[in-house]
Image (spheres, coloured by chain):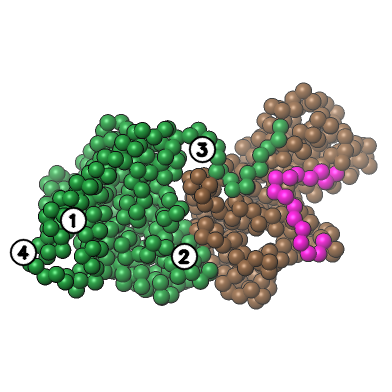
Amino acid sequence: MAELSLIEALRAGIDESMAADERVFVFGEDVGKRGGVFRVTEGLQAKYGPWRVIDSPLAEGVIVGACTGAAMSGMRPIAEIQFADFIWPAMNQIVSETARIAYRSNGDWNVPLVIRAPYGGGIHGALYHSQSVEAFFAHVPGLKVVVPATPYDVKGLIKSAIADPDPVMFFEHKKTYRLIKGEVPDGDYSVPIGKADIKREGDDLTVITYGLMLHYALEAAEQLAQTDGLNIEVLDLRTVRPLDTEMIFNSVRKTGKVLIVHEDNLTGGIGGELAALIAEHAFEYLDGPIMRLAGPDVPAMPFAATLEEAFMPSPERIAAKIRELAAY
Amino acid sequence: MASTPDTTEQYAGLSNEQLIEMYRQMVLIRIFEEKCQEMYTRAKIGGFLHLYVGQEAVAVGTINALKPEDHIITHYRDHGHAIARGLDTNALMAELFGKATGCAAGLGGSMHLVDVSKNFWGGYAIIGSHLLMACGIGTGLKLQKRPEVIMVFFGDGSTNGGEFYEALNFAQLGKLPVVFVCENNLFAMGTPIAVHTSVQEIYRKACAFDVTSERVDGNDPIATYEATVRAVEHARSGKGPVLLEAVTYRFRGHSAQDTQKYRTREEVEQYRAKDPNQVFRKRLIDDGVMTEEQAAELERQAEAEAQGSVDFADQSPPADEKWLTEGVYANPIEPKF
């Protein structure tokens, strides 16, 4: 057991998977000598060679298309999209091909592919380096969509994603890479795809969240325990497709109040789907309206620190929203 | 009539048996396609139907230069490639009819034929999209040090999109075993080539990536075969991809509903007068490779096979509803409510 940053845990997971299975290779922009723009794959090309960690052209279509074909023909590729904002040139490949192969071949073929992408704001990346994109992909049947938030989860989930026979979108909040540290067991373990996790138990109200917002929600919950005596449950989705409905409903049935928090903009976000599911399946347990706190409905995250702060849900804003719902 | 028994020199080393087999495939494609048109008119086939009539020499000339273990991925005008690869015509017609016995159990239809057992990776209907998957299959073959090649078919219209260039660039960078076959039938749907692309000799587009390329008369199955043998040898030996441009012409509309306002009846008739199937038939008979009687017998058999596929499709049960929701994931995670 060692304390690792999220990026170290992620790298360890990829490294161990590559050591264990020679079909696993990494393909992305600058992933080789440079080790990726965030240095997730640092040292891996030196260890495994240029045909296991392959520098790609700056063309996301070929990154995903080539990895899809390679996955179909027996490999276990990990595609790295340098920033989630850059994924759109590959959208056709992901939606038209990658997600569709198993279905259109009646299950004869499958695509064991992981598409990793750093997402999210709070790092002054501005209009093209800050977006949250998970809801677009959570809409697509055939994909699994994972958004881990802790070093333990990121290592366990990258291993599951690499071992999974289906395409997995793997979104890492770039602000968590070095900010978030935690205990990570040495060696092999995995965290299952499709399983949420109660990161803080409580019975007054459930906050459902994922990614960087998990940490902000935990901070808000701790503060409110001190100041308001509120006992908040914080549920980390970890996977946003498929959603762990069982754990979500169990928590809602226990607390009766739900606040959903995500950085992605409000309309059409994961929160809308969660609210619908809870309303359909746990309506009679609710003691208040399902509430959402999310990024604003603007096309991109602005640059200036004041604007960026105004965009991002913060621990303070989460705490305020919890108070509002708790008082309902 | 020439009676030379040995014609292998002028026929690219192909034996009489192989040549007759190629003619059989061309005839079968033609008659199958005409049967599809008939079934479409009779509303047995619905949706969109893109026929390969006129382009038979391309599929037959190229695919016969492959080994059975080599791979094929193609565009939505895919019946010809499927037949040349030896997919069961019963399963093909049943797929077009939307029947449970179809090669994709009725899930795909005309544009999305697939047969894993034949290394036939399917027809794809987003223009140029599958070129990148071909690069991926080539990457997989190379990384696993396997000896096969992947052949990818696409039309002249596909060469205007970015994925074509991404694919050529990466295939050459990685020296991947990919044979790109552009079926230049002179139209992107209803837009003539002079209107849709700035360089109309498609093979020249490869020079930007130093990709070996060649233009061939796609209406001549032997010339196409010879060029493909060269291309496959290049790709298989580790020298990288080849772009083969096969110039051809489709006799029927882009799809079954096409009124073809973009070309004249006279133009189509001019090409029909040089019908690749008829030219090849005459050549093989004139050179003593096959007899008129043999040709007629192959045509009779093709008619019987095509009609048999219709009967099979007619009698087959409709697509099973289980396929609506099955196969989405290899490892599905069911939600619990």
Element carrying mark 2: helix
Asked whether the beta carbons under mark 3 and mark 2 sit within 8 Å of each other, the answer is no
Q: Mark 4 belongs to which subunit?
A: B
Neighbours of disc 1 within 10 Å: few (<14), some (14-19), many (20+): many
Marks 1/4 same chain: yes
* Mark 2 or mark 4, earlier in chain: 4
Tint of chain B = green
Q: Which residue is mark 1?
A: B276
Q: Which residue is mark 4?
A: B1
Look at label 2 and name its amino acid. Gly
Real-space Cα separation, disc 3 to disc 2, in angstroms: 30 Å
Look at label 1 and name its amino acid. Pro
Real-space Cα separation, disc 3 to disc 4, in angstroms: 56 Å
In the drawing, what numbered circle is on residue A275? none
**Foreground residue among B54 and A41:** B54
Asked whether the beta carbons under mark 2 and mark 4 sit within 8 Å of each other, the answer is no
Look at label 4 and name its amino acid. Met
Front tag of 1 and 4: 4
In the drawing, what numbered circle is on residue B323? 3
As drawn, is B170 to the left or to the right of A20?
Answer: left
- Magenta stretch: give its range: A185-200
Could one spot residue B40 in this view of the protein?
A: yes
Vertical relation: A232 (above or below) A144 = above
As drawn, is A19 to the left or to the right of B320?
Answer: right
Say which quadrant the C terminus of chain A sits in: top right
Q: Which chain is brown?
A: A
Q: Mark 1 belongs to which subunit?
A: B
Q: Quarter of the image holding residue A8?
A: bottom right
Real-space Cα separation, disc 2 to disc 1, in angstroms: 31 Å
